[in-house]
Amino acid sequence: MKPPSELRVSRDRRTLTVTFDGEEPVALGAELLRVLSPSAEVQGHSPDQRVTVGGKREVGIARMEPVGNYAVRIVFDDGHDTGLFSWTYLAALCRERDARWQEYLEELDQKGLSRDR
């Protein structure tokens, strides 16, 4: 998959706008990116090991680091830095943002977790 034509972090560090050629820009919140990080810490090594991460409403993007020609490492201001966001995964998050966010909110509710610390 081709890389995005633009990755832009907002001034408040709370939003990453992703643009792929021929597509409209999509704003992905730092909280969504953090709680859906593709890292083993969040995703586990199998679906039954996946962790629902709460308390990240105020998380921001500290920096981004390119990883070859296939991904970007997003370093969050809470110290999380192990997720490599491939272009394919970012494209999926752009396409499925609203559905994945709703699933996350439902998981929080089911597990008695909060978006706040």
Image: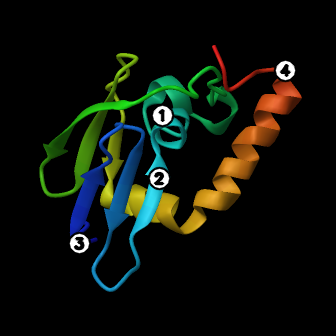
Q: Marks 3 and 4, how far apart in space? A: 39 Å
Which residue: 12% across, 50% down?
Answer: 68
Which residue is label 2 attached to? 28
Q: Earlier in the sequence, mark 2 or mark 3?
A: 3
Height in image: 24 above or below 12?
below
Q: Are marks 2 and 3 in contact (CB under 8 Å)?
A: no
SS label for mark 4: loop
Q: Estimate how packed mark 1 is, as few (under 14), some (14 to 19) or many (20 or more) residues with alpha carbons within 10 Å.
A: many
- At 48% from the left and 34% from the top, the residue drawn is 34
Q: What residue do we see at 32% from left, 69% from top?
A: 19
Specify the label residue 2 is tagged with.
3
Residue type of the residue flagged with mark 3: Lys
> Which of marks 2 and 4 precedes in the sequence?
2
Q: Secondary structure at mark 1?
A: helix
Residue assigned mark 4:
112
Distance between the alpha carbons at the discs numbered 2 and 3: 19 Å
- The amino acid marked with disc number 4 is Gly
**Local crowd size for mark 3, using a 10 Å CA cut-off: few (<14), some (14–19), many (≥20):** few
Residue nearest the observer in this picture, 53 or 59: 59
Return the residue at label 1. 34
